[in-house]
């Protein structure tokens, strides 16, 4: 059949059994609702049955109540109970009368959890009504919403009674007129009555507890309306506070005025009353928005409308129920960085600090969880320390309900080096040590040991950890349970110089023995790391390695692919430590460790940390004469160091330079090679420019023109006296002219200059350089001819005229500067020696300094 054929809805209610409410003074009536859709001719089209229940509260029931009269009144008002069940109702009422009252929620020893709805009818004044709502009278209640304010308030309270029962929500939801009327009343009359707004928002909150109703709530824009109400209420609150502060100041200014004092007391009482009603409204409003925010797109809209600022402002309230809801909402929002940043700008940490600690366990717990989310931000961690939360957190370590969260927060705080030292001013370290040593099981909790590892990275903290038998007890537990994380904490302690490191002398043998016998590789890595940190000049490392046969073990682990990278790194660090001993370094060199390191250097050249530590081992071995000869003359280690002296990592460059400086002091050939490489690297741009210009000029020679495409003629020399000075690559080979210099000029062919007037350096007796051509209009300098292997003034030179030795290497002075000037001319020794090594080379560019 077509849907439009349906014309009528027939409902049939069938009564069921009656029972007492488990906690409240109320009767629970179970009934069955049968709904049938009839066609135009009265024939049934669709039918559905549903189990429902109705709660009848009897708040006035006490020891003096007339049970019979109350039972008859209940049957008369509740159509779901047949009159024949009067004796049963009397019996149930009698049971309720004799039953002891359970403590109300939130009082006594009972703790309210976040999973429970912190909204209860008796906390809202607007919902207190003597009348009991009936689902069959929905139409009557709907008519009340079209009357004056008192009737609207009564109608909303009755609808709220129905909505608080989840079984009734579907039935109310099917009546679109009811939902629309409630939305309209909220839109038009929320400012007229706080109780009315609270009731209607509470009704929609009941709907929001179920996701299938969120679409209808969004359709009527209840969320946006609710945020507008919250914003308005917060502004009113600020005005109330300002007015109350004025009257308080007036009363304080005139202490003798009874009128001012009475006026202030009256205003304060009124303020508290208004505040209580407002907090009811805020509480149910935020709860509605919290339910709707399960959709991230809706949550984003709320953020754009300022929900974060609204919530942060409410943190200054004292209402426990409201605070726990607000903090829960903020915790949910804080997982997004945009919300976190907005909270930070509003000063959320300062506002939360007053809640730690507090009397309410649930509020304290959710506050700590919010602070944990915020502690992922370094700036917020700094604010927590600044407002004094660190000692408060430490004080909560003894509370089992909050211990885990507090440990996580303290771990985050211990990430910052500035904060690590502040732990020494609290009781944190003794508490943490006690918790570690008394931990049940073979492993310490991850959060606890992570905090201990971070704390041990600070020298003062490490000293406090080792006080008494602290280090001994930690090592004892670590060996007993083979706990690598506990060993990592001990390793952090071992890195500090001073008294703490001296304590490890007694445990060196145990650590070396553990390396050979314990199979847990992570544990062994930490043991090797501790030995690498234990640096004592008087310790016989050679005996230690021999007694525990560590050299073969080291060689095995250093083979490519034989061990994890972490293990390899720690072994190299250990080698750098033991090589400070002359005999130990010689023993390692004789066993081929140097060659193993070179092979490892090739295999791990991309790992900067491993490379740096290997170079440090070479640096340590260079100090010993026996190992120095092996490294310099029997290995290619210096060549690898030269390749790495210009590495992008500054630490690698630093260690390389120091090692090469020592090699250069003891080996002349390597010194020259090192100086040449430094010169080439420092002047690499200049050399590249020279080579490129030489190529360009050679191409120009092929076409017989200059750089500007013009044919070079001798007449050009006389016509362009003011051109710039050129570099060696700017001079033409065939006697061409570029700049102010002539190439290939032979002074013996010039009638004005003859060889007998030149000294050994090629200078004229009068101090004018040879090759100087003098004319009436200008002066021009010519560069001496120079080719590889040619002798000039008794010195072999390269193609640029730079002095070279028998191996073709450019000769440099003691500072690594070539013995030529900018134009390739040999530099007289007296100018080189006259620098004294005190002035900057750039000050002597005229005499061969380098840029």
Image (spheres, helix red, strand yellow):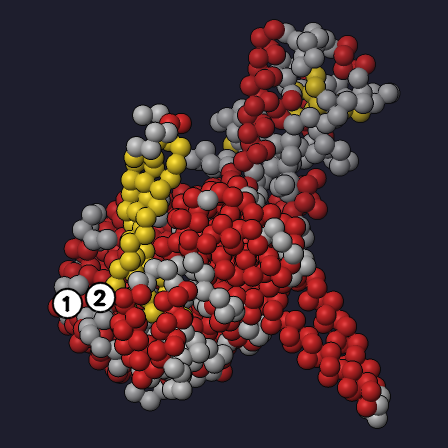
Above or below residue 599? Residue 253 is below
Q: What x and y, as percent, mark residue 651?
A: 45, 54
Q: Residue at x 61, y 32 (%)?
A: 824
Q: Earlier in the sequence, mark 2 or mark 1?
A: 1
Which residue lies most toward the front here?
84
Mark 2 vs mark 1, CA separation in Å: 8 Å
> Within 10 angstroms of label 1, few (less than 14), some, or many (20 or more) residues?
few
Residue drawn at x 24%, y 50% is 595
Question: Is there a contact, CB below 8 Å, between mark 2 and mark 1?
Answer: yes
Which of the image's four quarters has the N terminus?
top left
Residue at the image position 20 percent from the left and 53 percent from the top: 563
- Quarter of the figure with residue 446: bottom left
Can the viewer see residue 645?
no
Q: Which residue is mark 2?
A: 523
Q: Position of residue 654 (x, y in %)?
A: 47, 54
User: Looking at this rendering, what residue extends furthest in the right direction?
Assistant: 776
Q: Which element is circle 2 on?
A: helix
Residue 491 at x, y percent in the picture? 32, 70
The residue wearing badge 1 is: 518
**Image quadrant assignment for residue 554:** bottom left
Q: Residues within 10 Å of mark 2 (few under 14, many from 20)?
A: many
Instruction: Please report the residue visible at 23 percent of the width from the left and 74 percent of the height from the top.
Output: 478
The answer to which of 17 and 582 lies nearer the viewer is 17
Please give left or right for residue 256 compared with residue 115 in the image.
right
Residue 510 visible, this angle? yes
The quarter of the image holding the C terminus is: top right
Q: Is residue 495 left or right of residue 17?
A: right
In terms of depth relative to the viewer, which is nearer, 545 or 347? 347
Left or right, 99 with reference to 563: right
């Amino acid at each position: 059949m077509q849907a439009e054929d349906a014309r009528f809805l027939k409902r049939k209610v069938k009564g069921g059994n009656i029972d007492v409410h488990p906690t409240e003074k109320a009767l629970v009536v179970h009934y069955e609702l049968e709904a049938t859709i009839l066609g135009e001719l009265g024939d049934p089209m669709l039918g559905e049955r549903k189990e429902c229940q109705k709660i009848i509260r009897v708040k006035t029931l006490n020891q003096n109540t007339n049970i019979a009269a109350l039972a008859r009144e209940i049957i008369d008002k509740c159509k779901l109970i047949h009159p024949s069940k009067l004796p049963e109702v009397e019996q149930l009422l009698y049971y309720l009368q004799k039953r002891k009252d359970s403590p109300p929620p939130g009082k006594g020893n009972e703790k309210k959890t976040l999973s429970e709805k912190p909204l209860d009818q008796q906390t809202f004044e607007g919902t207190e009504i003597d009348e009991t709502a009936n689902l069959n009278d929905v139409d009557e209640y709907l008519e009340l919403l079209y009357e004056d304010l008192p009737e609207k308030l009564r109608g909303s309270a009755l609808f709220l009674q129905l909505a608080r029962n989840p079984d009734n929500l579907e039935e109310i939801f099917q009546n679109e007129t009811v939902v629309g009327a409630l939305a309209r009343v909220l839109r038009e009359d929320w400012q007229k009555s706080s109780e009315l707004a609270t009731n209607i928002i509470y009704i929609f909150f009941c709907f929001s507890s179920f996701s299938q109703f969120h679409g209808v709530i969004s359709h009527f824009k209840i969320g946006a309306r609710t945020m507008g109400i919250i914003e308005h209420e917060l502004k009113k609150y600020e005005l109330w506070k300002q007015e109350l502060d004025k009257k308080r100041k007036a009363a304080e200014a005139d202490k003798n005025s009874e009128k001012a004092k009475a006026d202030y007391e009256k205003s304060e009482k009124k303020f508290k009353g208004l505040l209580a009603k407002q907090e009811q409204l805020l509480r149910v409003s935020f709860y509605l928005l919290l339910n709707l925010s399960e959709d991230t797109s809706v949550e984003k809209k709320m953020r754009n409308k300022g929900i974060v600022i609204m919530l942060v402002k409410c943190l200054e309230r004292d209402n426990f129920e409201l605070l726990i809801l607000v903090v829960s909402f903020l915790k949910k929002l804080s997982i997004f960085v945009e919300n976190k940043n907005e909270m930070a700008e509003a000063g959320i940490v300062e506002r939360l600090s007053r809640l730690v600690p507090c009397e309410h366990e649930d509020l304290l717990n959710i506050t700590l969880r919010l602070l944990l989310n915020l502690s992922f931000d370094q700036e917020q961690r700094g604010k927590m320390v600044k407002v004094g939360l660190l000692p408060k957190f430490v004080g909560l370590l003894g509370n089992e309900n909050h211990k885990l969260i507090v440990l996580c927060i303290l771990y985050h705080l211990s990430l910052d080096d500035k904060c690590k030292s502040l732990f020494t001013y609290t009781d944190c370290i003794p508490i943490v040590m006690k918790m570690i040593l008394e931990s049940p099981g073979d492993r310490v909790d991850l959060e606890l040991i992570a905090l201990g590892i971070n704390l041990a990275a600070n020298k003062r903290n490490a000293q406090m950890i080792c006080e008494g038998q602290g280090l001994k007890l930690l090592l004892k537990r670590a060996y007993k349970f083979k706990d690598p994380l506990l060993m990592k904490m001990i390793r952090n302690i071992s890195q500090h110089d001073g008294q703490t490191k001296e304590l490890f002398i007694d445990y060196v043998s145990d650590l070396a023995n553990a390396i050979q016998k314990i199979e847990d590789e992570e544990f062994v890595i930490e043991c090797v790391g501790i030995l690498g940190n234990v640096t004592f000049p008087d310790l016989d490392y050679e005996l230690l390695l021999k007694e525990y046969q560590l050299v073969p073990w080291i060689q095995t682990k250093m083979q490519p692919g034989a061990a994890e990278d972490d293990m390899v790194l720690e072994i190299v660090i250990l080698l750098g430590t033991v090589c400070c001993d002359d005999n130990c370094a010689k023993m390692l060199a004789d066993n081929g460790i140097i060659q193993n390191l070179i092979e490892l250097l090739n295999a791990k050249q991309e790992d900067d940390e491993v490379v740096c530590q290997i170079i440090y081992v070479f640096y340590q071995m260079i100090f010993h004469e026996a190992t120095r000869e092996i490294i310099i003359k029997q290995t290619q280690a210096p060549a690898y160091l030269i390749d790495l002296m210009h590495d992008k990592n500054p630490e690698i460059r630093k260690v390389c330079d120091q090692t090469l400086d020592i090699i250069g002091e003891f080996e002349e050939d390597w010194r020259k090679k090192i100086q040449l490489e430094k010169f080439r690297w420092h002047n690499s741009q200049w050399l590249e420019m020279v080579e490129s210009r030489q190529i360009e000029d050679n191409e120009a020679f092929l076409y017989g023109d200059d750089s500007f495409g013009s044919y070079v003629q001798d007449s050009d020399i006389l016509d362009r006296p003011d051109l710039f000075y050129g570099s060696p690559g700017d001079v033409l080979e065939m006697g061409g002219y570029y700049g102010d210099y002539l190439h290939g000029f032979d002074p013996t062919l010039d009638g004005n200059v003859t060889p007998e007037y030149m000294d050994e350096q090629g200078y004229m007796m009068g101090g004018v350089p040879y090759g100087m051509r003098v004319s009436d209009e200008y002066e021009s300098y010519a560069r001496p001819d120079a080719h590889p292997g040619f002798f000039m003034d008794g010195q072999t030179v390269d193609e640029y005229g730079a002095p070279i030795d028998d191996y073709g290497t450019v000769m440099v002075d003691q500072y690594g500067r070539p013995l030529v000037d900018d134009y390739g001319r040999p530099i007289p020794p007296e100018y080189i020696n006259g620098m004294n090594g005190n002035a900057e080379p750039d000050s002597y560019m005229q005499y061969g300094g380098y840029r």
